[in-house]
Structure formats: C-alpha cells, structure tokens
Amino acid sequence: MSARLLSLVSEEAKATNSAPSVGYLSCKILKIVGLSAGAQYPFRVKIRVLYAQDAPQEVKHKITKQLSSQSQTSSFNSNAMVEGQTQASVPKPQKQLAEALQSICKALSKLHSLADIADILNVEERQVDEFLHPEKSTQTMKQVQAATNPTFDEVVQLLLPEIEKNGTVQLEVVNKQSKSLGTVDIPVHKILEGEHLCACGPFILTTGPEIIGSLSLKWLA
C-alpha cells in the first residue's frame, strides 16, 4: 500500500491521469431567496455533476457503478457522474433591537410610528415591532422565517473521476419530504471560463427562487 499527496491546480496540463479522481468541485451554498412562506422546511440543495448527452454509454456505466454506492443522496441519478448534498437549512438569524436603544424606542413609541422609530434609530422596522410587541413573535412567524429565509453557509466538496467540459452541474432544491422545488443547470464550460475557474450566483431555479453561492473547479495534480 502506498499514498500520494495531491494538490489542486488550475491548469489541465498539470493534472494527474492515474488517480481514481482527477477533478475537484467546490460548491459554496450560502442561502436561498424567493421561496414561498408555505414551503415545507428544512430544505437541502442537491448537487449533481451530469454527463454530456453525447457521452458514451460504456463510460457512464463504468463510472456510475463505481460511484453509486458512495452517493450521499438517498437516490442516485443514473446520468450523474457524482452527487452530493448540503445539510438541512436553518433560518436566517434575526437581529434584535440593541439594549442601548430599547429605552429610546419605548419613549419614541408614544409619539411616533414604527416606521418613524426605525428611521430615527437606523434599524429595521421589524426589530422595533418585535421589541414593542413581543406577543407577535409567535411560532407562525418563526415558521415563516424558516421557510422564506433558509441559510446553509456550507461548502460541499466533490471529487470527480473526470472533468467533462460538455457536462453540467445541476443544483436542485428539495423540501422536507424530498420533493423538488426546482433545478438549475450550470454548464461545466461556463465554470472553466470564469475567473479563477469559478461561476458565481445567484443561480435561478426553474421555479423562480435563487440559490446564492458559487461553484469552482480544480484539477488534481
């Protein structure tokens, strides 16, 4: 048994051809915007690297057979070279009104509207409303936050048996029941053509919401 230390490079000419994996895909998933308040949270983002449509079937079969047992997702897409997914989303942390402003807020509330107080204190109107009316911070509001402001702040790393320039990186958002909420396809060549071999979002799903994040590729050498 022997081991070899590999490094990440931006030049294909320096890539190794002898290792089981020759490419590295970094998927930075920060958050999703534009989901409806009724969406069933938490959410996950699935990442698939798909073959080009004209890829030989024998190549697909060989690599899929090697990787399907290693898939992190519950079901492996037969057209995928490799798959991965994020952890479950969490609600976006909400800022509360600073303690130093609370007494001022109370005093202003006798003569001013929520919007005026927020403008005077240079804070969000929501912060003022939640401080003055804590009874409004109900479970329903928390559920709306979880559904409409899901965050991940996560980097999913995938090793690729090859970097197929005519292939596609597909991102799919699924809900709590693993129901698809939309997909977006990013051509691999677009990532390779980007500065530092990177494609930056937002990535717009077929259904409208946007994934905020970035994709970057490197070769192993």
Image (spheres, grey):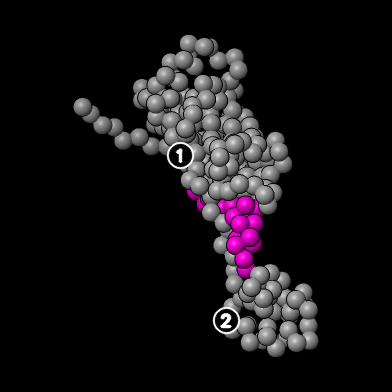
Closer to us: 141 or 27:
141
Which amino acid type corresponds to the residue marked 1 in the rendered image? Gln
Residue 95 disc label: none
- Residue 207 location, x and y as percent? 71, 38
Q: Residue at x 38, y 37 (%)?
A: 7
Q: Is residue 167 visible in the rendered structure shown here?
A: yes
Closer to us: 129 or 9:
129
Q: Is residue 86 above or below residue 3?
A: below
Range of magenta residues: 137-155
- Residue 199 location, x and y as percent? 60, 39
Q: Is residue 167 magenta?
A: no
Closer to us: 10 or 175:
175
Q: Is residue 9 visible in the rendered structure shown here?
A: no
Q: Is residue 154 magenta?
A: yes
Q: Residue at x 53, y 31 (%)?
A: 48
Which amino acid type corresponds to the residue marked 2 in the rendered image? Glu
- C-alpha separation, residue under disc 1 versus residue under disc 2: 41 Å
Q: Residue at x 55, y 48 (%)?
A: 42
* Quadrant of res 220: top left
Residue 157 disc label: 1
Q: Is residue 11 above or below residue 144?
A: above
Figure quadrant of the N terminus: top left
Figure quadrant of the C terminus: top left
- Residue 38 location, x and y as percent? 67, 49
Q: Is residue 164 left or right of residue 68?
A: right
Please name the residue that numbered disc 2 is placed on.
Answer: 99
Q: Residue at x 72, y 41 (%)?
A: 208
